[in-house]
Image: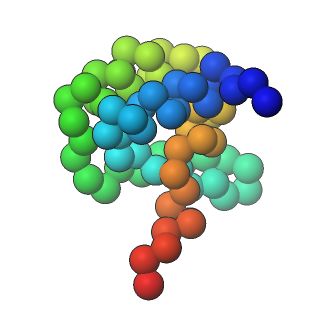
Amino acid sequence: MEKTETRKLAEEYMLLGGTRQVMIDDNKTFVRQYDGEPAEAERFWQEKIAPLDKARRDDVEFFLPSVNSDTQG
């Protein structure tokens, strides 16, 4: 299966050490950032993801790690 452009953006962001996580509630996405992240990841987010229109940014956020799937216990 071919990866979508938004999935590729999310994966590249994570490979740069990005720490943002998504919480999905009632089909709405909310991004949380609990830890700092490398400057490269922050720059990538600001240059490549933040400028996207809301629908495409929501698609990118969908592929971030989920707050709800935290496996700490």
Residue at horizontal 52 percent and vertical 51 percent from the top: 65
Q: Is residue 19 left or right of residue 6?
A: left
Q: Quadrant of the N terminus?
A: top right
In this rendered view, identify the residue nearer to me: 69 or 58: 69
Quarter where residue 57 is shown: top right
Which residue appears at 44% of the width and 16% of the height?
48
Q: Residue at x 52, y 25 (%)?
A: 9
Q: Who is closer to the viewer here, 7 or 21? A: 7
Placement of 49 over or under 31, stated as above or below = above
Q: Is residue 32 visible?
A: yes
Judge from the rendering whether residue 15 lies leftward or rightward of residue 59; answer left or right.
Answer: left
The image shows residue 56 at horizontal and vertical percentages of 64, 23
Give the image location of residue 5, x and y in percent. Answer: 64, 19
Q: Is residue 55 visible?
A: no
Determine the image quadrant of residue 60.
Answer: top right
Seen at 29% across and 29% down, the residue is 42
Q: Nearer the viewer, residue 53 or 62?
A: 62
Q: Position of residue 50 (x, y in %)?
A: 45, 23
Q: Position of residue 39 (x, y in %)?
A: 20, 29
Work out which residue is located at the far bottom of the displayed protein and give it.
73
Q: Is residue 6 placed above or below 11 in the rendered structure?
A: above
Query: In the image shown, does 9 or 53 lie closer to the viewer?
Result: 9
How many labels were placed on the picture?
Answer: 0
